[in-house]
Amino acid sequence: MTKKVGYLGPEGSFTEAAAKAVLPGNDRYPYSTIPSCMAAAAKSDIDIAVVPLENAIEGSVNMTLDYLIHKHDLPIIGEITVPIEQHLMVHPAREKDWEDISNIYSHPQAIAQCDDFINNNLPNAKIHYTNSTSSAAKDISEHPGFNGAAIANYLAAEKYGLKIVKQNIHDYDNNHTRFVLLSNKDNKDSFESKENQSGKTTLMITLPSDYSGALHQVLSAFAWRKLNLTKIESRPMKTGIGNYFFIIDVDQDMDDVLIPGVIAELEALGCGVRILGSYPCFLSHSLEVKPILE
């Protein structure tokens, strides 16, 4: 059955490419912001929301985490990691004098991922932050009079008719982003069988305020069961300075013994535990883009 899949748009975004890679053959709907995409899934306007969660260079996408924790009870039902290639693109009318551009438009994380290139090649350019890389490309295409360039991917350049003048301008080669799939329904049957599939369980844990050594006890509950943790991150609870919760990724699916045993042990210590999802993880080796420059 065809699903309605929402993603951070507009068309041509990395998130659309991730949605297409993991959920081919479904209807895709762009949303201008991460919160609006997640809200649509919470209201069942769409079946699945695809949003960025973490970049290998810049770390977690805090907006996704905050809305996942504080705004919506949307289980994570899947994850896909894709390679990220950032390119500098301009309106075709600006191709020959691109080195004179004075404005750069892109998502804050994309700007940060290309910091060295910007400082070395366009140090005087003014930075303008957009909701997504593809929205930056769309803005440049619609305003040929702008003395500006966008940082985005090949798909956005192709979609909006822009000319890539510098390719692969990100600072580090191993640039990948994790995207999570969120749904208030069980839509795991939407995934086709894929290579490089693994399982993961994500937990949110709050510590008792008056328990000395609580974090050590939390980690010990995983360690003696030989459960591998692929990520542990603290985030503010938004209730006062010094109040934090922890997001922990366990490198396996929810089982009947080990992870339930961890949860029971942590709750006995006075910790709060919330399961954010137990889900399949996919790895895409390519966004299947064409050669960029001759």
Image: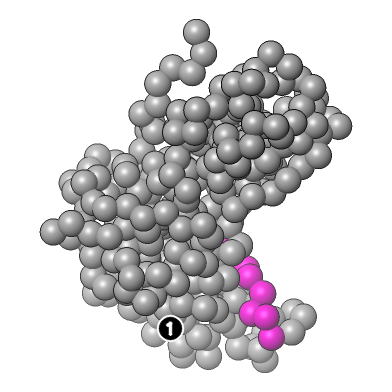
> In the rendered structure, which segment of residues is drawn in magenta?
230-239
**In the picture shown, does residue 57 fall above or below 172?**
below
* Residue type of the residue flagged with mark 1: Glu
Q: Is residue 72 above or below residue 113?
A: below
Task: Give the left or right position of residue 207, taking residue 289 as reference.
Answer: right
Query: Where residue 140 sits in the image (x, y, percent)?
Result: 62, 36
- Please name the predominant secondary structure of the magenta segment in the image: strand
Q: Dividing the image into 4 quarters, which one contains the N terminus?
A: bottom left
Point out the residue furthest to the left here.
1
- Is 198 left, or right, of 113 in this rendering? left
Residue 272 seen by the camera? yes
Query: Which element is circle 1 on?
Result: helix
For the point 71% across and 34% down, which residue is it? 146
- 80 over 236 or under it: above or below: above
Instruction: Name the residue: 42% across, 78% down.
Output: 73
**Residue 157 in the image, given as x and y percentages of width and height:** 51, 30
Location of residue 119 by image quarter: top right
In the rendered image, residue 24 lying in the magenta stretch gets the answer no
**Residue beneath the point at 52% across and 67% down:** 35
* Residue placed under numbered mark 1 in the picture: 265
Residue 180, image x, y percentages: 41, 57
Residue at 36 percent of width and 29 percent of height? 288
